[in-house]
Image: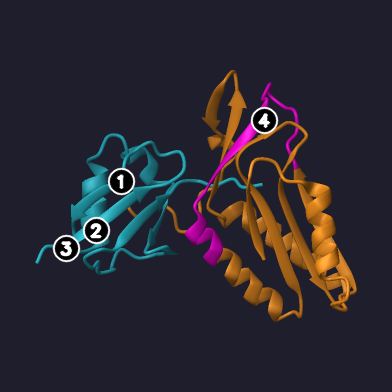
Amino acid sequence: MSILVRVEFLGPIQKESLEIEITNLKQLADILQKDKEIVQWLENSAVAVNDTLVSSLDIALKDGDKVSLLPPVCGG
Amino acid sequence: MLYLYDGALNVPKILTDWYEEEATSNYGAYIPFVGTVRSEDGISGLSFDIYEPILKNWFKAWQKKAETKSAIIKMAHSRGDVMLHESSYIAAVFSPKRRVALEFIDEFVEDFKASAPIWKYDLKDRQRIYASERSTAIKGSGLLA
Protein backbone atom coordinates (compact mmCIF):
# COMPACT_ATOMS: atom_id res chain seq x y z
CA MET A 1 0.00 0.00 0.00
CA SER A 2 1.38 3.40 -0.87
CA ILE A 3 1.62 6.08 1.77
CA LEU A 4 0.33 9.44 0.61
CA VAL A 5 1.03 12.52 2.69
CA ARG A 6 -0.47 15.95 2.07
CA VAL A 7 1.94 18.89 2.39
CA GLU A 8 0.46 22.36 2.88
CA PHE A 9 2.23 25.70 2.62
CA LEU A 10 0.67 28.33 4.85
CA GLY A 11 0.41 32.11 4.86
CA PRO A 12 2.59 33.92 2.34
CA ILE A 13 4.18 30.83 0.77
CA GLN A 14 2.68 30.89 -2.68
CA LYS A 15 2.52 27.22 -3.49
CA GLU A 16 -0.28 24.74 -3.98
CA SER A 17 -0.49 21.76 -1.61
CA LEU A 18 1.31 18.57 -2.61
CA GLU A 19 0.32 14.92 -2.25
CA ILE A 20 3.52 12.92 -2.04
CA GLU A 21 4.68 9.42 -1.18
CA ILE A 22 6.98 9.75 1.82
CA THR A 23 7.29 7.91 5.11
CA ASN A 24 9.21 10.45 7.18
CA LEU A 25 10.14 14.12 7.39
CA LYS A 26 13.72 13.53 6.29
CA GLN A 27 12.42 12.49 2.87
CA LEU A 28 10.28 15.61 2.75
CA ALA A 29 13.32 17.76 3.61
CA ASP A 30 15.24 16.17 0.72
CA ILE A 31 12.41 16.90 -1.70
CA LEU A 32 11.78 20.49 -0.58
CA GLN A 33 15.48 21.39 -0.55
CA LYS A 34 15.46 20.74 -4.31
CA ASP A 35 12.33 22.87 -4.86
CA LYS A 36 13.38 26.35 -6.01
CA GLU A 37 10.09 27.93 -4.95
CA ILE A 38 10.32 26.58 -1.43
CA VAL A 39 13.99 26.32 -0.49
CA GLN A 40 14.17 29.99 0.57
CA TRP A 41 11.41 29.42 3.13
CA LEU A 42 12.85 26.33 4.82
CA GLU A 43 15.28 28.10 7.17
CA ASN A 44 12.52 30.21 8.72
CA SER A 45 9.58 27.84 8.62
CA ALA A 46 8.22 25.69 11.42
CA VAL A 47 6.73 22.28 10.68
CA ALA A 48 3.51 20.74 11.95
CA VAL A 49 2.31 17.17 11.53
CA ASN A 50 -1.47 16.85 11.79
CA ASP A 51 -1.63 20.37 13.26
CA THR A 52 0.92 19.76 16.01
CA LEU A 53 4.28 21.52 15.78
CA VAL A 54 7.22 19.11 15.70
CA SER A 55 10.88 19.52 16.58
CA SER A 56 12.43 16.35 15.17
CA LEU A 57 12.79 14.80 11.73
CA ASP A 58 12.47 11.32 13.25
CA ILE A 59 8.73 11.16 12.87
CA ALA A 60 7.12 8.36 10.91
CA LEU A 61 4.35 9.47 8.61
CA LYS A 62 1.22 7.46 7.90
CA ASP A 63 -1.12 7.44 4.94
CA GLY A 64 -3.38 10.52 5.11
CA ASP A 65 -1.10 12.54 7.40
CA LYS A 66 -0.90 16.28 6.87
CA VAL A 67 2.36 18.20 7.08
CA SER A 68 2.19 22.00 7.24
CA LEU A 69 4.94 24.58 6.76
CA LEU A 70 4.52 27.74 8.83
CA PRO A 71 6.64 30.73 7.78
CA PRO A 72 7.41 33.63 10.20
CA VAL A 73 4.30 34.98 11.93
CA CYS A 74 3.06 38.40 12.97
CA GLY A 75 -0.38 38.53 14.52
CA GLY A 76 -1.99 41.55 16.12
CA MET B 1 -12.66 32.00 24.48
CA LEU B 2 -11.24 32.68 21.03
CA TYR B 3 -13.24 34.76 18.56
CA LEU B 4 -12.29 35.26 14.90
CA TYR B 5 -13.97 37.89 12.75
CA ASP B 6 -13.86 38.86 9.09
CA GLY B 7 -12.55 42.44 8.92
CA ALA B 8 -12.13 44.98 11.72
CA LEU B 9 -13.17 44.28 15.30
CA ASN B 10 -16.07 46.12 16.89
CA VAL B 11 -14.05 47.20 19.92
CA PRO B 12 -16.76 48.79 22.12
CA LYS B 13 -19.08 45.81 21.61
CA ILE B 14 -16.44 43.16 22.28
CA LEU B 15 -15.11 44.89 25.41
CA THR B 16 -18.64 45.40 26.71
CA ASP B 17 -19.72 41.84 25.91
CA TRP B 18 -16.68 40.43 27.71
CA TYR B 19 -17.26 42.73 30.66
CA GLU B 20 -20.89 41.66 30.91
CA GLU B 21 -20.07 37.96 30.51
CA GLU B 22 -17.85 38.09 33.59
CA ALA B 23 -19.56 40.87 35.55
CA THR B 24 -20.69 38.52 38.30
CA SER B 25 -17.84 35.98 38.08
CA ASN B 26 -16.05 37.55 41.06
CA TYR B 27 -12.91 38.56 39.18
CA GLY B 28 -11.20 41.55 40.72
CA ALA B 29 -9.37 42.54 37.55
CA TYR B 30 -10.25 42.79 33.83
CA ILE B 31 -7.22 43.82 31.77
CA PRO B 32 -7.82 44.23 28.04
CA PHE B 33 -5.24 44.94 25.38
CA VAL B 34 -6.51 46.50 22.14
CA GLY B 35 -4.28 46.56 19.07
CA THR B 36 -5.00 49.33 16.56
CA VAL B 37 -3.67 49.69 13.00
CA ARG B 38 -1.42 52.76 12.87
CA SER B 39 -0.56 54.92 9.91
CA GLU B 40 3.06 54.27 8.92
CA ASP B 41 5.06 53.79 5.72
CA GLY B 42 2.14 54.86 3.55
CA ILE B 43 -0.03 51.81 4.24
CA SER B 44 -3.79 52.01 3.91
CA GLY B 45 -4.30 49.08 6.27
CA LEU B 46 -3.23 45.57 7.17
CA SER B 47 -4.48 42.17 6.13
CA PHE B 48 -4.29 38.84 7.96
CA ASP B 49 -4.25 35.11 7.19
CA ILE B 50 -4.95 32.74 10.05
CA TYR B 51 -4.34 29.01 10.29
CA GLU B 52 -7.13 28.11 12.65
CA PRO B 53 -6.35 24.51 13.73
CA ILE B 54 -2.98 25.41 15.23
CA LEU B 55 -4.21 28.76 16.56
CA LYS B 56 -6.96 26.94 18.44
CA ASN B 57 -4.47 24.45 19.93
CA TRP B 58 -2.14 27.29 20.93
CA PHE B 59 -5.00 29.14 22.58
CA LYS B 60 -6.19 26.02 24.45
CA ALA B 61 -2.71 25.63 25.94
CA TRP B 62 -2.89 29.22 27.21
CA GLN B 63 -6.37 28.64 28.61
CA LYS B 64 -4.96 25.76 30.66
CA LYS B 65 -2.12 27.96 31.86
CA ALA B 66 -4.62 30.63 32.87
CA GLU B 67 -6.68 28.08 34.81
CA THR B 68 -3.69 27.26 36.99
CA LYS B 69 -3.73 30.92 38.09
CA SER B 70 -7.52 30.99 38.54
CA ALA B 71 -7.64 33.38 35.59
CA ILE B 72 -9.36 33.27 32.18
CA ILE B 73 -8.32 34.70 28.83
CA LYS B 74 -10.33 35.91 25.89
CA MET B 75 -9.01 36.85 22.51
CA ALA B 76 -10.47 38.30 19.30
CA HIS B 77 -8.63 38.62 15.99
CA SER B 78 -9.47 39.72 12.46
CA ARG B 79 -9.19 37.76 9.24
CA GLY B 80 -8.70 39.68 6.00
CA ASP B 81 -8.42 43.46 5.70
CA VAL B 82 -8.37 45.97 8.56
CA MET B 83 -7.96 49.62 7.69
CA LEU B 84 -6.11 52.45 9.47
CA HIS B 85 -7.27 53.24 13.01
CA GLU B 86 -9.37 50.12 13.18
CA SER B 87 -8.62 47.23 15.52
CA SER B 88 -7.45 43.75 14.49
CA TYR B 89 -6.64 42.30 17.90
CA ILE B 90 -8.07 42.28 21.40
CA ALA B 91 -6.83 40.12 24.25
CA ALA B 92 -8.03 40.23 27.83
CA VAL B 93 -7.31 38.54 31.11
CA PHE B 94 -9.71 38.26 34.02
CA SER B 95 -8.30 37.21 37.37
CA PRO B 96 -9.10 37.46 41.03
CA LYS B 97 -6.14 39.77 41.63
CA ARG B 98 -4.66 42.49 39.44
CA ARG B 99 -1.00 41.42 39.64
CA VAL B 100 -1.71 38.04 38.05
CA ALA B 101 -3.71 39.66 35.24
CA LEU B 102 -1.08 42.32 34.52
CA GLU B 103 1.71 39.78 34.30
CA PHE B 104 -0.36 37.27 32.38
CA ILE B 105 -1.49 39.71 29.67
CA ASP B 106 2.15 40.63 29.04
CA GLU B 107 3.30 37.00 28.76
CA PHE B 108 0.29 36.07 26.66
CA VAL B 109 0.63 38.89 24.13
CA GLU B 110 4.39 38.31 23.78
CA ASP B 111 3.88 34.63 23.04
CA PHE B 112 1.01 35.50 20.71
CA LYS B 113 3.40 37.67 18.68
CA ALA B 114 6.04 34.93 18.57
CA SER B 115 3.92 31.82 18.09
CA ALA B 116 0.35 32.33 16.92
CA PRO B 117 -0.04 31.15 13.30
CA ILE B 118 -1.19 34.46 11.86
CA TRP B 119 0.42 36.22 8.90
CA LYS B 120 0.34 39.96 8.37
CA TYR B 121 0.37 41.85 5.09
CA ASP B 122 0.65 45.59 4.42
CA LEU B 123 -2.02 47.03 2.15
CA LYS B 124 -0.16 49.52 0.03
CA ASP B 125 -0.66 50.83 -3.51
CA ARG B 126 -3.46 48.27 -4.05
CA GLN B 127 -1.08 45.42 -3.22
CA ARG B 128 -1.03 42.93 -0.33
CA ILE B 129 2.62 42.69 0.76
CA TYR B 130 3.80 40.13 3.34
CA ALA B 131 5.29 41.95 6.35
CA SER B 132 8.39 39.76 6.39
CA GLU B 133 10.61 42.26 8.25
CA ARG B 134 8.19 42.42 11.19
CA SER B 135 7.51 38.70 11.33
CA THR B 136 9.07 36.21 13.74
CA ALA B 137 10.09 32.65 12.94
CA ILE B 138 8.23 30.22 15.20
CA LYS B 139 10.46 28.46 17.75
CA GLY B 140 11.97 25.34 16.17
CA SER B 141 11.87 26.70 12.62
CA GLY B 142 14.39 25.41 10.09
CA LEU B 143 13.76 21.71 10.70
CA LEU B 144 13.56 20.98 6.98
CA ALA B 145 16.46 23.25 5.92
Query: Residue at 50% across / 46% down in the picture?
Result: A72
Q: Circle 1 sits in a helix, a strand or a loop, which is it? A: loop
Q: Amino acid at mark 4?
A: Gly
* Image location (x, y in percent) of residue B87: 74, 42
Amino acid under disc 2 = Val
- Which mark identifies residue A5? 2
The chain carrying label 4 is B
How far apart are labels 2 and 3 at the CA level? 7 Å
Distance of label 2 from label 1 (alpha carbons): 10 Å
Q: How is the image coloured?
A: by chain
Q: Position of residue B8 (x, y in %)?
A: 70, 41
Q: Is residue B26 above or below residue B128?
A: below
Q: Residues within 10 Å of mark 4 (few under 14, many from 20)?
A: many
Span colored in magenta: B36-57
> Label 3 marks which chain's residue?
A
Q: Amino acid at mark 1?
A: Ser
Q: Colour of chain B?
A: orange
- Foreground: B102 or A12? A12
Respond whether the residues carrying marks 1 and 4 are from the same subunit: no
Q: Is A65 on the left-hand or right-hand side of A11?
A: left
- Mark 2 touching mark 3, by CB under 8 A? yes
